[in-house]
Image (spheres, helix red, strand yellow):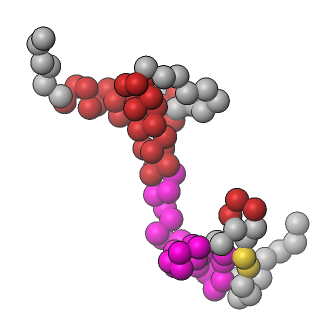
Amino acid sequence: MGLIDPTKRHELTGLWAGFGFQQGHMWTPEGFTLYPEQMAWWSLTCNIAREWTFMMAERRGEVIQGMDRPSDRDPRVSILRHSLQASRPRVRR
């Protein structure tokens, strides 16, 4: 793998087709420019989306195979569904 010249335009391929880098920023297929400081929370956003996917699957009674939960890997990660269940008032039926 060679070095990437940050001043030249680099377009990505495969699953990342349409994304690229140039002059210290990244662009998306939709034409948005992303700067490094804007990418600081991607991991958190992806983990929240993954946890939401698990919550919705559990609600439907499904099991998702081949994908681990962020809360399974790191004990410091709060489990979103537990927080939501604790804050929701109980309804008797």
Answer above or below: position of 92 versus 1.
above
Answer above or below: position of 12 versus 9.
above
Nearest the viewer among 72 and 75 is 72
Q: In screen coordinates, is 93 left or right of 21?
A: left
Q: In the picture, which quadrant includes the N terminus?
A: bottom right
* Residue 27 visible (yes or no): yes
Q: Position of residue 33 (x, y in %)?
A: 52, 79
Q: Magenta segment range?
A: 20-43
Give the residue at x 50% y 65%.
39
Task: Give the number of callouts.
Answer: 0
Toward the bottom, the furthest residue is: 7
* Residue 79 visible (yes or no): no
Q: Is residue 30 magenta?
A: yes
Q: Is residue 24 magenta?
A: yes
Nearest the viewer among 26 and 66 is 66
Give the residue at x 53% y 75%.
30
Location of residue 60 (image quadrant): top left
Q: In the picture, which quadrant includes the C terminus?
A: top left
Q: In screen coordinates, is 25 left or right of 12?
A: left
Give the residue at x 49% y 40%.
50
Q: Position of residue 57 (x, y in %)?
A: 45, 29
Give the residue at x 18% y 28%.
88
Nearest the viewer among 13 and 35 is 13
